[in-house]
Image (cartoon, rainbow, N blue to C red):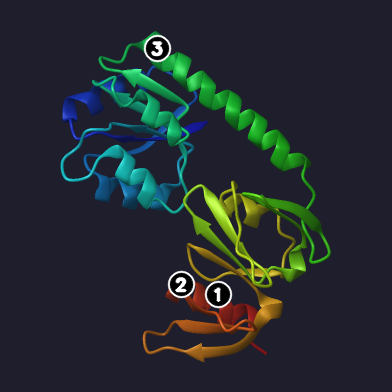
Amino acid sequence: MLTVVIVDDSRLARVELVNLLGQIADIDILGEAENVDNAKALIDQTRPDLVLLDINMPEKDGFDLLTELTSVPEVIFTTAYDQYAIKSFEYNALDYVLKPVTAPRLEQALEKVRDKLKVRNAQDDSDPLLTPDSQFFVKDGDNCWLVKLGEVSLIESVGNYSRLYFANNKPMIYKALSKIQARLAPGIFFRANRQQLVNMRDVVNVEPLLNESLELSLKNGTKVNVSRRQSVEFKTLFKL
């Protein structure tokens, strides 16, 4: 099944998309949102494969939503305006569908999503798990590194990218944090919060905070706040 969230400030537009998607067997609509703030909460909660996203909305637009998301799903813009087409592909949108949306045009766009997810899933299935001794190549601008996973102290989500912290370097790679986490062998990194993975070998101190969460201190002096939910998991994993 292809899981979908619909984001559009127009109720009529959302109803039309629901009706069109309802005629397609492999679609599961996880929810609808009429503004960016509600959409962000819904997407963070449901983690859909795809967002059908309007651009022009009150207060914040569709591009604002993409910059605010921790992990960005595949995106198809559905809009009545054609002047944003070039900008939309700068945000890695898979397609740009003009309203009124027709069934054939929507199906054409959905097929792009299916094809991309098939390729991604095939790659994920064939990739071995990374251990502390696993080496990988990192290029950021004109700089290149061959890095061992064990040398990375922190991995941080930046939209569709992830920032790696090792030595005095902090390059970004085009891979979502969730995809990196899926390739890590168990026990190396801990998911401290939605944005950060911490190398447990680099943790030198654990400090309890007033709100029942934790603060981790790393060898390089970096301090990482562990969310309340993850603090419970941390205590469970590492208790005597």
Name the spot of residue 91 as percent of width and height, x first: 43, 37
How many residues crowd around disc 3 within 10 Å: few (fewer than 14), some, or many (20 or more)? Answer: few
Image coordinates for residue 63, horizontal then vertical, percent: 33, 40
Q: According to the image, label 2 marks what residue?
A: 229
Quarter residue 51 falls in: top left
Q: Earlier in the sequence, mark 3 or mark 1?
A: 3
* Element type where label 2 sits in the image: helix
Q: Residue furthest front?
A: 142
Name the residue carrying label 3.
105
**Can you give x and y, in whole percent of width and height, for residue 229 in the image?**
46, 72
Three-letter amino acid code of the residue under disc 3: Arg
Badge 2: residue crowd in 10 Å (few <14, some 14–19, many ≥20): few
Assess disc 1: are there few (<14), some (14-19) or many (≥20) residues with their C-alpha within 10 Å of its C-alpha.
some
Q: Determine the CA span between mark 2 and mark 1.
A: 7 Å
The C terminus sits in image quarter: bottom right
For residue 129, above or below residue 166: above
Whether residues under marks 2 and 3 lie with C-beta atoms below 8 angstroms apart, the answer is: no
Q: Specify the amino acid type for callout 2.
A: Arg
Given this view, does label 3 or label 1 mark the residue nearer the observer?
3
Q: Are marks 2 and 1 in contact (CB under 8 Å)?
A: yes
Compared to 151, does 54 lie above or below? Answer: above
